Image (spheres, rainbow, N blue to C red):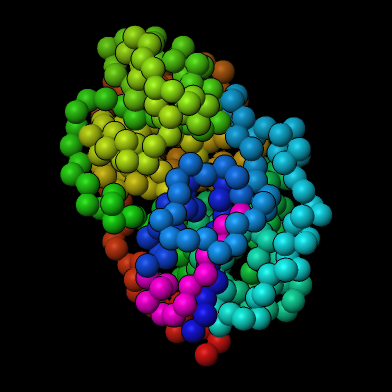
Amino acid sequence: MKILYAIQGTGNGHISRAREIIPLLQKYGELDILVSGTQADVKLSQPVKYQLHGFSFIFGKKGGVDHYKTWLNMNLFRFREDMKQLPLKEYDLIVNDFEPVSAWACKLQGIECVSLSHQAAFKSKKVPRPRTLDWGKLILSRYAPTKYHIGFHFDRYDTFIHTPVIRAEIRNLKSENLGHYTVYLPAIDDKRLVKLFTQLPNVTWQVFSKHSKVAYQEANVFVEPVNNEKFNKSLATCEGLFTGGGFEGPAEALYLKKKLLVAPMRFQFEQQCNAYALKQFGLPVIWGSTRNWLPIVKNWVENPQKHEFDFPDETAQIIDDMVKKYARV
């Protein structure tokens, strides 16, 4: 059996999940990997057969998407050419993690593919989401269209939705509390974060920044370039994680029983939905309209947080069911 696994390369969550799923898919046949996008800091250990430009949202430094850089990064001609060159008919199973080039190529060629992603969960009307008019809704529904859907979310909101894929490297961590707080807010410049966190001098902050190429310390704030191993170690030993409205990062923190505070990116509808779902569980959120973050962060640090999430390891069974149901063999 030949399998194509197409992965979105914007952000680290898709790649992190893929590192867990790839070895499982390889058990069923010959696996080719396709990655499109330009914003991931985490890398795959397996060879990538198709590395495409795709369509990535560029992180800004003020809490949202940098629309101008995103527009400059677009290359619709290349997108179309990449679609035409993909030999999709060679594959018995095409698995898509919110990757647009292969998804649209399948749609135009009349080839079935299955989405295996967090975004697939939003095909259900039962998934919590804010009642807002947002162009992001259209992007979420049309960005990577597929015929079949297997989704992941913080809860089993529907029959085709499963709890998050927690990487083995996270499940194997020894979780303890050494008192510091871990921060990953890729859409915010680290200088802004340092200015905020130095106002809470009795707290140690370990900030992982997309915008700094060197490590440095300012008072009680330690800033590091994004590094998977260092981040995992910091997360395992922290008291809490302050992060954006992504999916994998918050899920891993909840699995490790850490306190969680999220600040979803502005102009990013999926992150707004994730934050809205976490809010339903009683977890704190800093919305884009909040001007003064300090009182919320201070309250989060000073008070305990209780939550109970059950994320069992079901990934192997999900992959087995998917292959048996959707492979064309």
- Place residue 108 in its image quadrant: bottom right
Residue lying at the far bottom of the rendered structure: 329
In the drawing, does residue 235 fall left or right of residue 147?
A: left
Q: Nearer the viewer, residue 84 or 203?
A: 84
Q: Which residues are magenta?
A: 24-36
In the drawing, does residue 40 fall left or right of residue 256?
A: right
- Place residue 318 in its image quadrant: bottom left
- Place residue 194 in its image quadrant: top left
Q: Nearer the viewer, residue 4 or 118?
A: 4
Q: Report x, y in % for residue 20.
A: 37, 60
Task: Identify which residue is drawn at 50% across, 16% down.
Answer: 191
Q: Report x, y in % for residue 230.
A: 32, 36
Q: Nearer the viewer, residue 162 or 191?
A: 191
Residue lying at the far right of the rendered structure: 77
Q: Report x, y in % for residue 202.
A: 27, 12
Task: Identify which residue is drawn at 32% across, 41% down.
Answer: 229
Task: Identify which residue is drawn at 45% across, 84% down.
Answer: 324
In the drawing, does residue 1 fall left or right of residue 36?
A: left
Residue 274 painted magenta:
no
Q: Is residue 194 visible?
A: yes
Q: Report x, y in % for residue 15.
A: 47, 53
In the drawing, does residue 202 fall left or right of residue 74?
A: left
Residue 27 painted magenta:
yes
Residue 156's place in the image compared with 229, above or below, is below
